[in-house]
Structures are given as C-alpha cells and as structure tokens.
Amino acid sequence: MRLFWTFAGLIAVAIGLVGIVVPLLPTVPLMILAAFCFGKSSPRLHDWLVDHPVYGPHIRDWRTHGAIRAPAKRIATVSIFVAFGISVMLAVRPSILAIQAVVLIAVLTFIWSRPSA
C-alpha cells in the first residue's frame, strides 16, 4: 500500500508542477493531496513537501485551519472569471455555459467560505 500512496503522491506533484505553467490547473490543492499521500507512505517526502518554501505554508495553513490565503483566493477568482470569459468568447453552447457557471460558482463559494490564513 505504501507504494500506491507514494506513486499517487508523485503523480499529484507532477500534475501540480504542470499547473505552474498551465492556467487553471490548481497547483496548491494538488500539493496538499501529495502531502496527504506522502503522509501515508513516505515521511521523508512528506517532510520535504510540508517544509517546502513555496508550498509548505499553504499546506500547513490548510492542515491546521482549513485556510486559503487571501492572495490565492483572489488569483483563483480572477482565473475563474477569465476561464468563463474565454468560454463566452468562444461561443460555447448556452447549456454548457450554464453547467460551467454552476460549477464555478460552487468552487468560488467553497474558496471564499474558507478562512483566510
């Protein structure tokens, strides 16, 4: 089982790293997932990720308070509006836009309901 959790954590880190350059791919949530996976498999990788200078504070904020930092909330909000705007500009079908709007509103509601770190 340790091998499974290590592999899942490595996949989450890899996809999270892709999220650095691909808009709308959430990096920090994937690093939080990786920390969870590494916590079940590899103390060394877990500690490396939790102590990472960029991702560590976000992971610790989430773990201790369920918090999302205010700048991250703002970036997520802008990204969501940009993504929806692109869909509108590309003339996506109204039914798809409606589904997208409902999902994005749910995501924004979750993000903004979390305490700020």
Image: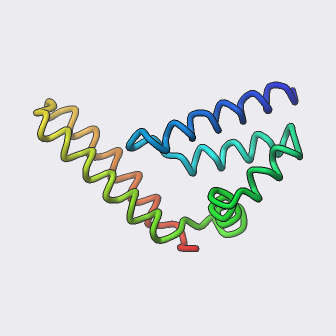
Left or right: 19, with 79 as reference point: right
Q: Quadrant location of the N terminus?
A: top right
**Scheme of image coloration:** rainbow
Q: How many marks?
A: 0
User: Image quarter for residue 58?
Assistant: bottom right
Left or right: 117, with 39 as reference point: left
User: Image quarter for residue 13?
Assistant: top right
User: Image quarter for residue 7?
Assistant: top right
> Residue 71, percent across and down?
45, 68
- Residue at image x 10%, y 33%? 91
Q: Nearer the viewer, residue 100 or 83?
A: 83
Left or right: 104, with 90 as reference point: right
- Residue at image x 71%, y 33%? 10
> Residue 53, percent across and down?
68, 61
> Residue 55, percent across and down?
64, 56
Q: Quadrant location of the C terminus?
A: bottom right
- Residue at image x 14%, y 41%? 88
Query: Residue 76, relative to residue 36: is it above or below?
Result: below
> Residue 30, percent across and down?
60, 43
- Residue at image x 53%, y 73%? 116
